[in-house]
């Protein structure tokens, strides 16, 4: 028993000698240990990037990562083969996709088509969509209202049910002949054939990069929805409600726009991390009453 007690006393004396009687040695030792751990972390990261540079930042098993990798490979192959147009090679354009969903069993109704038209009319009047260059690529407004110049000048009139039914029959006839190659196919869902109705439709606008485009999208177009879509603290402007959609009149809509989402969300996320560091530092300083210990604790 005495031998065990003596060993415990010696261990305690050794601990006190290092951590109490020699604080400078303790501080230097801790700093060197932290520096060594930092070097190991950086070296491990560099090793991973060196061994697998192309996908060092990917979630390797993620479905979206695999799809994006396949898309990039296909685009590279198209560029190398010369099948890609010059404007596509330059890749100086932005895509805006609008996915619409009906609250009923058919989105091709007078009220819902008018609400879609009123929403997209803002895009047409913005000056960023060059109708003469094929903007939009496809849209139910383009098919049911015909002339975008009439939409821009006269507004979105309430179409008659007979006009919509006639157009739907024309679309159904073309789809029956050409299938998925039909020019109407992008605005339809798989339930349209045989029923002449669909609960889903979509539009695609392709813009050339221009000053003021993102301001129009994020400060005028998205805030006009219900509820408004806008960036907030730790919130993306594309979140929407539980179904990832929001409303424009009687129609539900989900929006995709090519933008650097990561950088837009990084600023509030980084500010939260910075606030956390400052808060913990002030708390330690107030609790210990030592600026030196507070700085050392934060460094550790």
Image: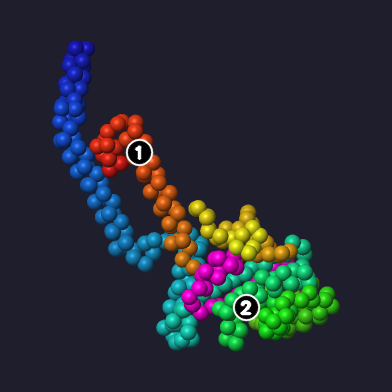
* 254 w.r.t. 194: above or below: above
Q: From this viewpoint, is residue 178 visible?
A: no
Asked whether 178 or 294 is in front, the reply is: 294
Does 222 sit above or below residue 267?
below
Question: In terms of depth relative to the viewer, which is nearer, 167 or 161?
Answer: 161
Q: Is residue 121 magenta?
A: no
Q: Is tag 1's residue or tag 2's residue first in the polypeptide sequence?
A: 2
CA neighbours of label 1 inside 10 A, class few (<14), some (14 to 19), many (20+): some
Q: Is residue 177 left or right of residue 21?
A: right
Q: Quadrant of residue 172?
A: bottom right
User: Which label number is shown at residue 124?
Assistant: 2
* 204 inside magenta stretch: yes
Provide the residue designation for mark 1: 282
Measured from the top left, where is residue 10 in percent x and y? 16, 21
Coloration of the structure image: rainbow
**193 in relation to 271, above or below:** below
Q: Position of residue 30 (x, y in %)?
A: 22, 39
Element on which disc 1 rests: helix
The quarter of the image holding the C terminus is: top left
Residue 120, percent across and down? 65, 73
Q: Which residue is depicted at the point 63% across and 64% down?
A: 224
Q: Residue at x 54, y 66 (%)?
A: 218
Is residue 173 shown left or right of residue 44? right
Horizontal arrangement in the rendering, residue 225 relative to residue 78 (left or right) = right
Residues at badges 1 and 2 in contact (C-beta under 8 Å)? no
| Rendered residue at 54%/74% (across/down) | 95
Residue range corresponding to the magenta coloring? 196-222
């Amino acid at each position: 028993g005495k031998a065990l007690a003596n060993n415990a006393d010696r261990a305690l004396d050794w601990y006190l000698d290092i951590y109490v009687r020699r604080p400078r040695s303790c501080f230097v030792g801790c700093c060197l240990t932290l520096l060594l751990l930092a070097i190991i972390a950086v070296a491990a990261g560099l090793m991973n990037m060196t061994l697998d540079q192309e996908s060092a930042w990917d979630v390797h098993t993620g479905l979206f990562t695999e799809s994006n990798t396949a898309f990039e490979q296909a685009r590279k192959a198209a560029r190398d083969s010369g099948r890609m147009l010059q404007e596509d090679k330059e890749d100086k354009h932005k895509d805006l996709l609008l996915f619409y969903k009906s609250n009923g069993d058919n989105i091709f109704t007078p009220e819902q088509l008018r609400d879609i038209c009123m929403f997209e009319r803002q895009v047409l009047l913005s000056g960023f969509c060059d109708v003469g260059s094929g903007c939009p690529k496809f849209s139910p407004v383009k098919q049911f209202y015909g002339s975008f110049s009439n939409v821009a000048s006269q507004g979105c009139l309430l179409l008659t049910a007979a006009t919509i039914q006639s157009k739907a029959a024309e679309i159904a006839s073309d789809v029956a002949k050409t299938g998925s190659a039909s020019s109407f196919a992008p605005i339809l869902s798989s339930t349209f054939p045989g029923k002449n109705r669909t609960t889903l439709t979509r539009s695609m606008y392709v813009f050339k990069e221009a000053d003021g485009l993102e301001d129009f999208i994020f400060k005028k177009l998205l805030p006009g929805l219900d509820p408004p879509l806008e960036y907030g603290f730790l919130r993306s402007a594309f979140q929407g409600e539980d179904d990832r959609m929001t409303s424009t009149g009687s129609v539900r809509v989900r929006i995709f726009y090519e933008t650097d989402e990561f950088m837009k969300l990084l600023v509030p996320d980084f500010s939260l991390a910075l606030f956390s560091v400052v808060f913990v530092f002030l708390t330690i300083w107030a609790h210990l009453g030592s600026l030196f210990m507070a700085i050392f604790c934060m460094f550790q």
